[in-house]
Each structure stands twice: as C-alpha cells, then as structure tokens.
Image (cartoon, helix red, strand yellow):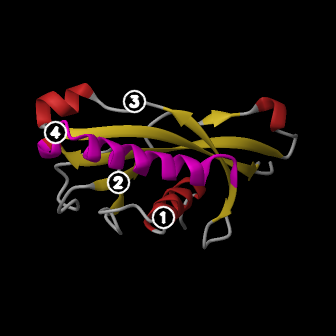
Amino acid sequence: MTTPHTAILIDVAENIRNLPLDEIGDNVHVLTIADDREDIIQKLPAVTVSPFGREMIEPSRSTNVSDMIGYPAFIVFLDGADRAQSLTALDQRLQWRAQVVDHFIENSLRTTDGVEYWTTIEPDTTVDPGAWFDRKVFAGAVMVRCKHRKQRRRA
C-alpha cells in the first residue's frame, strides 16, 4: 500500500507534467532528493519532486480523531548552465517557476488513490549558486506544502 506522502508526490509530479512547461514536457521525476546526475534524468531541462524537507503538523487544525499533516513536495527546476547568462534562458526558467507556483498556490487536489490534499507555496532558492558554479547546472527550487487530513489510529 502506498503512503499518502508517496501518493501525493506522484500526483504533484503528474500535475507538473500536465503544465505547458516549454522544453520540459514529461521530463518530471520523483526522486529521494534532486540530483541532476541521476540516471533517470537523461537530459536537461528537467523537474524533480522529492520529499526533501520537514513534515509539519498543524495543531490548531487537528482534532481528537485526525491531524492536519503538511507533507513536503520539494520542486527543483534543473537546466544546463550552458545557456549561461542569456536573458531569454533566465526568463524561461523563471516562467517554469511561475507556472508551478500559480498552479499549486492554495489549490485543492486529489490523487488517483483518492488522497485529498491542499497545497500552499513556501518560496525557496531561486538560483542555487553552488550548483551553478560547482556543477554548471541551473537549480532553482520551491516548496509545495501538501496538507492532508490523516485519521489517527484507534487504540
């Protein structure tokens, strides 16, 4: 049986695949952590979705029978730095980010397994200088916080 967090990560990736992200298409992958050297990523640009980050529990929205869990879906946009300082390339990378943020900001979704979740956006690094200078890769990220009401186990 798939955990709610895994089902949500798969669904977030599918939602991103369905966005009209120029040059990315279906090159969207669920990974443990973003890694442009991962074999599954055959070419750049690509998007990765990972559970990187902390889960959160919202005590004010929890009850005696359920908890509101905020699962992390860390989105990383990857592209080769060979398009270096081109304003056109920068604009396209920022457009990918804007489209994903617009889709997931305050949205209500359901996985194919029937897991309901609500999304908010937590801004993150727009451009990672370490990836740029050390690996010659553009890497920009945004956290999609996926909130799911989880029923408590009965004693």
Q: Label 4 belongs to which residue? A: 84
Q: Name the residue under label 1.
A: 19
Q: Distance between the residues labelled 3 and 1?
A: 21 Å
The residue lying at 82 percent from left, 37 percent from top is 61
Labels 3 and 1: the sequence-earlier one:
1
Q: Which of the two residues, 22 or 79, is positioned nearer the viewer here? A: 22
User: In the rendering, at what x and y percent does residue 91 appear?
Assistant: 35, 44
Q: Residue at x 20, y 53 (%)?
A: 38
**Rounded to the nearest whole Å, what is the CA distance between mark 2 and mark 3?**
15 Å
Q: Residue at x 80, y 51 (%)?
A: 154
Report whether 116 appears left or right of 85: right
Q: Name the mark nearer the viewer: 3 or 4.
A: 4
State the separation of the CA atoms marked 3 and 4: 18 Å
Please report whichever mark, 1 or 2, sits nearer to the chain's N-terminal start.
Answer: 1
Within-10-Å neighbours for mark 2: few <14, some 14–19, many 20+: many
Residue 146 lies, in percent from the top left, at 61, 47
SS of the residue under disc 2: strand
Residue located beneath label 3 in the image: 125
* Magenta-drawn segment: 82-107
Element type where label 3 sits in the image: loop
Q: Is residue 46 left or right of residue 94?
A: left
Instruction: Name which residue type carries label 2.
Output: Val
Label 2: which residue?
47
Give the image location of residue 93, x and y in percent.
Answer: 34, 46
